[in-house]
Image: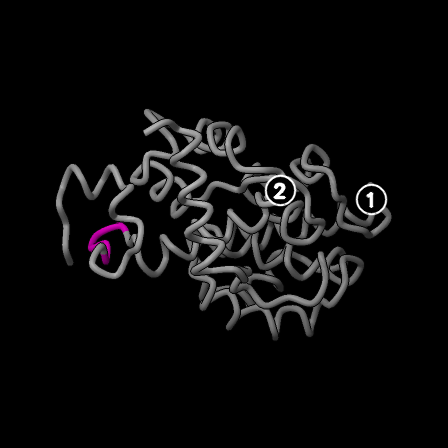
Amino acid sequence: MEKKELFERVIDYFLKEMPIAETELIYKDPFELLVAVILSAQCTDKRVNMITPDLLKRFPTPAKLAEAEADEVFDYIRSCTYPNNKAKHLVGMARMLVNDFGGQVPDHIDELQKLPGVGRKTANVIASVVFNKPAMAVDTHVFRVAARLGLSVNSKTPLETERQLVQFIPDDLLPLAHHWLILHGRYTCTARSPKCKECGLTYLCKYYADNRLVK
């Protein structure tokens, strides 16, 4: 099957099966999502959603967070992964927002990546989710699902996967496609025991063809 046709069939499937797909992180504005995404690195959205209410009640704006010290922030996020580093990143991010961006979260990927704790994946999430930019964030779920379906081929890095995906997914669908692949990877195409029996994409799936998994 040609690559273009494969993408078209996968897109058609998700448009029918998952017409609405959104982040599971709870937020009210760009700053809150930025905080949540920084915390979500190697941590579950469920855990982040447990942490952010108290954290954001204490530090509801970039200005408030910029006034804090990392030790104080640590007390609110100690239950997430790598709390020491994330506390430093959150304070540094807030201070840069205040000092360099007028307290506003920038909408450009290059500017977002200047912020402490913000890599390309996080920048793409903010750009696509908040600002509806044609960006494809590649986390572990997207990386795995894209490879298994054959949407990415011989990709060794998230950036390689991103570049392959954006070649064939229309710009207007990229923000939605990002969530399709994440949610499919989180609940169906799981890392250790993919639920192939529940998946409507097995007839297209390279991983399924190679392994004939029926769990």
Q: Which residue is mark 1?
A: 101
Magenta residues (range): 191-195
Q: Main secondary structure of the magenta part?
A: loop
The residue shown at (36%, 52%) is 185
Which quadrant of the structure image shows residue 61? bottom right
The residue shown at (74%, 43%) is 107
Q: Quadrant of the N terminus?
A: top left
Residue 193 covered by magenta stretch: yes
Distance CA(mark 2)–CA(mark 1) = 15 Å
Amino acid on which disc 1 is placed: Phe
Please name whichever residue, 172 or 64, is drawn nearer the observer in this view of the structure: 172
Q: Position of residue 126 (x, y in %)?
A: 64, 49
Q: Helix or strand or loop: what does disc 1 sit on?
A: loop
From the viewer's perspective, tell me whether residue 131 is left or right of residue 10: right
Q: Which residue is mark 2?
A: 123
Q: Residues within 10 Å of mark 2 (few under 14, many from 20)?
A: many
Disc nearer the start of the sequence (2/1): 1
From the viewer's perspective, tell me whether residue 115 is left or right of residue 215: right
- Compared with 130, 108 (above or below) is above
Q: Position of residue 44 (x, y in %)?
A: 42, 61
- Compared with 175, 108 (above or below) is above
